[in-house]
Amino acid sequence: MSTNPFLDVPNGKKTITLVGIYLALISQLFVSTGVSTLLPLAAEEIGGRTLYPLASNISGLISIIAMPLYGYMASKNPSVKRTLVSFSLLAGVVVNLVRAIAPDMMTIVAVSTLWGLVSAGIYVLGFSMIRDMYDEKKAGLFLGASGTVMSLGMLVGPAITGLLIDFAGWRVVCHMNWMLMFAAAVLIFFGVKITKEEGAAMGQGGRKFDVAGCVILMLFMGGLVLALSFGPGSSGLPALIFGSIGNTALLALSAVSLIALFFIVRKKGDSAVLPARVLKDRNTVCLTLYNFFATCSSMAVMFFMPSFARYVMQTSATQAALTTTMIAVLGIFISPFFGSKIAKEKSARGVIAVGSIVRIGVTLVLLLVLKPTTSLLAIYVLILAAGFYNSQHSVTISAGPQIQIAAEIRVMGNSVVQLAQTVGGAVGLAVYTSVIGAQGIENGIRTAFIIAAVTAVAALVMGLSLNPLKQESAPVNN
């Protein structure tokens, strides 16, 4: 028997788990890409126009706790991954089911706090399960294929959501989403399984979970994200708008928490919520910072191009929506190539370099040509080209940690890398929203693209700083 019992599981069980993970990705993207259309319509019907943005913002807070917690539990005993992912997807089932029957917006906001468990389960543990089941070469291919699945979800999710809302209503969309997520949870639960004893032999026992550090981490990131979310031009609570006493207090809380987190890691070392050994690992740090900067850069296109097309260029809603859905096209075809290349080279450095150069080029061209009179076709072509780096980024954050982080710290390292996705998205969205709120869409989006180009360069630097593993990772995945 192999030292990694996951490798010895029958191929049929592996296929069931793989399909379940891919289905979970699709259902998660259906929700995340459709929520910007669904929630405003729900607010019109059940009230809460000033509340519905919180349903999206608040969901990231629980993932700040769940990601390091899941990483700790899985590193201690990898047999729990299957249960944790299934549990997380069932939390997503509850979120969508309650949304479908919610009588008011406050109910939707309250239940949305659980949504962070879904992303934590999929991105911290789901990708790790693929690495558990297959050798380096096959894992690279299947993790690359996850980029194809994500691109499909991004491409068809908004269209299906829009059609269902038009013909059946927003509640039907929520019912569809919870059923897809429930099917994924069932597949994963009845897929690959190892015993607790086999998992204990693979895991790292003895280390206690750092509860205090986890709370401090949540205060640091929560304070920062909330403070930035109520920037200039925000329509949020007056007491929290940038420059107010409340907003200043959130920033102060974040700063104090960051200092406290530094001392906790220094004192507890590998027992801290962010283990010192993981934070000292060059590849983990570089992949984490790459993910943060690349995600920040992506927000400029993903969230604000439709608004520019709709309100500045005066296009139809359908034409505006295509400015983001076009970004998913290339990923359907090229994502497996990126995954295989990362596995073959045992490094994401080359893939990141090529993708980041394309990212910088497309961003600069958009900065130069984006005007009210710009041809819509030209924008579509540029967004189609952006699909190259969007696919590269998606595959890098799924395959990169599984291939390039040493096996003994892989799960905890991956949890830190994936946490950067949540923080990068929240910070990027908050910064761009503040800029556009203060300068207006036409002028603000140009400033946003300047920031996006700078963060894209930072992402490139982080990618070039990666080192390939000197030897193939051990089959144990802790």
Image (cartoon, rainbow, N blue to C red):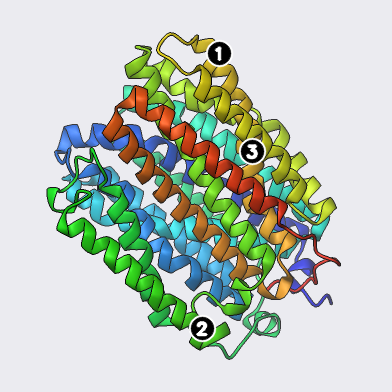
Q: CA distance from mark 3 to mark 1?
A: 20 Å
Q: Note whether 417 is above or below 155 in the view shown.
A: below
The percent coordinates of residue 51 (x first, y second) are 19, 45
**Which mark is on residue 34?**
none
Q: Earlier in the sequence, mark 3 or mark 2?
A: 2
Q: Residues within 10 Å of mark 3 (few under 14, many from 20)?
A: many
Among numbered discs 3 and 1, the one appearing first in the sequence: 1
Q: Is residue 117 visible?
A: yes
386 vs 4, left or right, is: left
> Of 70 and 212, which appears nearest the observer?
212
Q: Which residue is mark 3?
A: 391
Name the residue tied to disc 2: 266
Q: Give how far apart the Cα atoms at labels 2 and 1 are.
A: 52 Å
Write down the quadrant of residue 388 in the picture.
Answer: top right
Residue at 42%, 42% (x, y): give it.
Answer: 32
Quarter of the image containing the C terminus?
bottom right
Q: Amino acid at mark 1?
A: Ala
Residue 49: x and y, percent? 17, 38
Instruction: Specify the amino acid type for callout 2.
Output: Arg
